[in-house]
Image: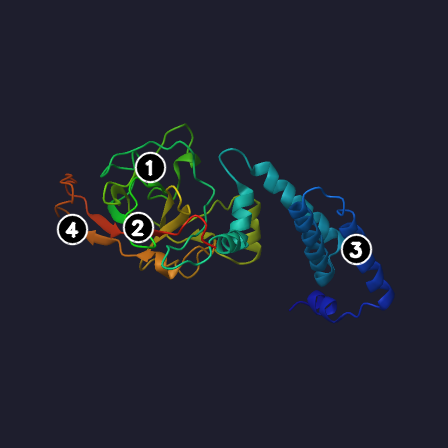
Amino acid sequence: MTSTEEVNQHREIDAEQRAREEALIETVRASFDGTHDARVEQILKSLTTHLHAFVRDVRLTEEEWKAGIDFLTATGHITDDRRQEFILLSDVLGASMQVIAINNEAYADATEATVFGPFFVEGSPEIDQGGDIAGPAAGQPSWVEGSVRDTEGNPVVGAKIEAWEADEDGFYDVQYDGDRTAGRAHLYTDENGNFRFWAVTPTPYPIPHDGPVGSLLAAANRSPMRAAHLHFMVSAPELRTLVTHIFVRGDDYLERDSVFGVKESLIVDFDEQPAGTPTPDGRDLGDKTWTRARFDIVLAPADAG
């Protein structure tokens, strides 16, 4: 603990100063009494309470307040339609995972959700069963298969599966110049609720850390690395949309994922197959090794929780 922290922790705030600070909080809270939407009023009043509590807890200096404003300004400036720095900030502070936990309450054996991430793109190409989401994305081929069921064990026919991932160098297609689409596609489960597609074997990569969020991580002596993963978003009528990943068993970053997204139930085996091993669909991979993984998905009812 630094000397400044020790002073702030043990400093006694006299009654008059404390009353002045608390009066300000009540004044700001009261300013929202006329809010037309009750939920908006609740959020704004709670935000006021907790924000002021933080400022008072650390006895924030004017210089630190200015540094915080500059940080948020820089976060806004670097954000555009291809990079969402505010999502990265929410992710590394664990706020994204907390929102997910609140909004995806445990229900029976439904598959756990995890962070959405900043690189999803609407309008991905559709592929058939056994198709390839990788496109021009470089990496070791990986056969991914599984099923989608509801919590009663019934197959979910026609569930939409969006899948997206980084290439072997740790970059998503939107991080490259140009408009190419790679490492993303969608497909629909078959008449038995099953799916299968080719991807590339996920590899660990750093979140973008050349901006304000990277500076925050560096100041905190934290790694920007994400555990290797493949994104899924699965939706079907009357069932809760699932946003999740699968993670590679044995990856070095499973216990120190920079956005706290790893859950034990989402870690799967990507079993490496020797070159020349026949593929499930007869695809000729020449002298390439490849992996295969299975991920069985269970969707909760739409009104669960």
Q: CA distance from mark 1 to mark 3?
A: 50 Å
Q: Which residue is mark 4?
A: 274
Q: CA distance from mark 4 to mark 1?
A: 28 Å
Count of marks placed on residues:
4
Density class for disc 2 (Cα within 10 Å; few <14, some 14-19, many ≥20) is many
Q: Is residue 234 left or right of residue 4?
A: left
* Circle 4/circle 2 CB separation < 8 Å: no
* Circle 2/circle 3 CB separation < 8 Å: no
First in sequence: mark 4 vs mark 2: 2
Identify the element where label 3 is drawn. Answer: helix
Q: CA distance from mark 2 to mark 3?
A: 50 Å
Give the x, y percent position of residue 250. 31, 60
Q: Which residue is mark 2?
A: 149
User: Looking at the rendering, in which quadrant would you find the N terminus?
Assistant: bottom right
Identify the element where label 2 is drawn. Answer: strand
Q: Amino acid at mark 2?
A: Arg
Instruction: Indicate which label's residue lies in the foreground, 4 or 3.
Output: 3
Q: Which residue is mark 3?
A: 26
First in sequence: mark 4 vs mark 1: 1
Q: Which residue is mark 1?
A: 186
First in sequence: mark 2 vs mark 3: 3
